[in-house]
Image: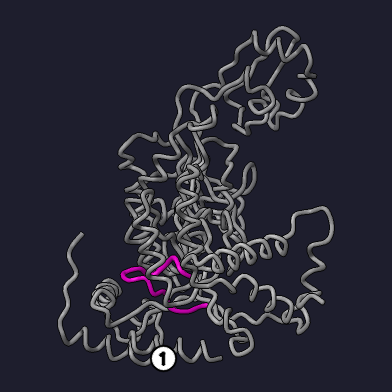
Amino acid sequence: MTEVTYTEEEKKKILEQLSKKTWKIPELAKVIQMDKAKVKKIVQDLIDQGIAAYWSSGSTTYVATKAYVQELEKKRAQG
Amino acid sequence: MSETPLVDELEKGPWPSFVKEIKKTAENMEKRAAQGMDIKLPKTARALLKQLEISYKDKKTHWKHGGIVSVVGYGGGVIGRYSDLGDKIPEIEHFHTMRINMPTGWFYTTKALRGLCDVWEKWGSGLTNMHGSTGDIIFLGTRSEYLQPCFEDLGNLEIPFDLGGSGSAIRTPSACMGPALCEFACYDTLDLCYELTMTFQNELHRPMYPYKFKFKCSGCPNDCVAAKARADFAIIGNWKDEIKVDQEAVKEYAKWMDIENEVVKLCPTKAISWNGRELKIDAKNCVHCMHCINKMPKALKPGDERGATILIGGKAPFVEGAVIGWVMIPFIEIKKPYEEIKEIATRTLEWWDEEGKFRERLAELIWRKGVREYLKVIGKDVDVRIVKAPRNNPFMFFKKEELRPSPYIEELKKRGMF
């Protein structure tokens, strides 16, 4: 399998979207018109760096920035 | 007066009661905490009963489903759950579920079980579910801040455990007990399941797919893990040659069993004959339903040329309806290191990942794109045994140009009627 590479510009573009809401990867790839494999790679790297995080309903998984997810969780915990 | 009169009703009667079990756990957790043991959530099991009581009164759930999956590096294995009664019952404000990857075939030593329970009593409510429908060990009820230390403690046990799958990922592969316990096993389900688990670790822990994807390994067509109904990728043990018949053992059965009525007449394809001295099976008509083998296990055994059938697409009703897996590979040899199966699985996953819509399972994608395309993806030819339902409608459709023109239609065309 060929290694997926990306630019800082592309990473920034994704990060910007991840700070707005929780995303499904295919949806995110469609909105920013980027190859899904590339989006996955960038998101995975952002998660490894602790910048992005998963949010799961149990059956379906979404991604967003860690800050966004933490804020969302705080709201949910408070009701 | 009990705090939970409605819930207490469920303790009555001779049958097992989850309320009794929750109460037992609550007492145990409170006792251990009073003894000075390091127990972080001694009152959560009791609080669960209080919330249930309120839900029964209000006739609605007080759970909020979903949340963060906060184990470092993982995206699955934890199902977030919060209560909207956090202000009234703070002990149950967070009640996350952890899915723990079970040992293949669900074999445990008591030491392994003790280790699991010790960790869970320290970091969770003490309530467990052995096992969830996918097969995982389910730990019920902990707080967000205890997920990581609990996960680390599980990994540091002498017999360590890892989280299982959840969300849009490969779910924890499961297998029947196979050759460890069953003479019908046509391949080593335990080993293949372990190999698949290890091969797809990244896909199991890091959810990036359109939806869930399940592998299940059954050793024979009895399909004790119900792979064909529940797994997108079911590997069901099978054999190519004839059922092995021990005529002497058949005669032993004949002494007390009505072979004609209990076996011969119940064969779905009438492939068996019995003349009182000899049992014959017409292998060409045998559909491997296992009925005769199950009835006379000492006399009949699966054949020697053993392997598996791969069924694709089994799933529950959500989105487009339930599907019983379709035979895609009628027979495949199952040999370590299982390269062929892994290759087929990898190609399947890549195709589904690329083409699948949100929450579209593999069966629904095949419905949408066609079996022909899927077979191209996995590099297999069409086989007459690929049918949508047994002895029913053909599943493989031909392209228009491949069809021989119908003389009837041609005649209608000539007459300008078509």
Q: Quadrant of residue B302?
A: top right
Q: Position of residue B6 (x, y in %)?
A: 80, 74
- B155 vs A60, left or right, is left
Residue B403 appears in the picture as rendered: no
Q: Position of residue B289 (x, y in %)?
A: 63, 34
Looking at the rendering, in which quadrant would you find the N terminus of chain A? Answer: bottom left
Q: Position of residue B265 (x, y in %)?
A: 77, 26
Compared with residue B90, is residue B189 higher up or lower down, i.e. above or below? above
Label 1 neighbourhood size at 10 Å, few (<14), some (14-19), many (20+)?
A: few
Q: Which residue is mark 1?
A: A71
Picture quarter with the C terminus of chain A: bottom right
Residue at the image position 50 percent from the left and 71 percent from the top: B79
Farthest residue to the right: give it.
B13
Residue B257: tell me if it is visible: yes
Q: Main secondary structure of the magenta part?
A: loop
Q: Is residue B77 magenta?
A: yes
User: Dot 1 falls on which chain?
Assistant: A
Determine the residue positioned at 38% across, 61% down.
B153
The reply to whether the magenta stretch includes residue A9 is no
Snapshot quadrant of residue B88 = bottom right
Q: Nearer the viewer, residue B53 or B158?
A: B158
Residue B166's place in the image compared with B102, above or below, is: below
Residue in the foreground of this view, choosing between B246 and B147: B147
- Residue at the far front: name it: B35
Instruction: Where is residue A57? Give x, y as percent.
Output: 50, 76
- Looking at the picture, tell me which residue is in the foreground, A63 or A33: A63
Tell me if B259 is positioned left or right of B196 in this view. right
In the depicted structure, whether residue A22 falls above or below residue B336: below
Q: Secondary structure at mark 1?
A: helix
The span picked out in magenta is B66-78
Residue visible at 69% across and 73% down? B49
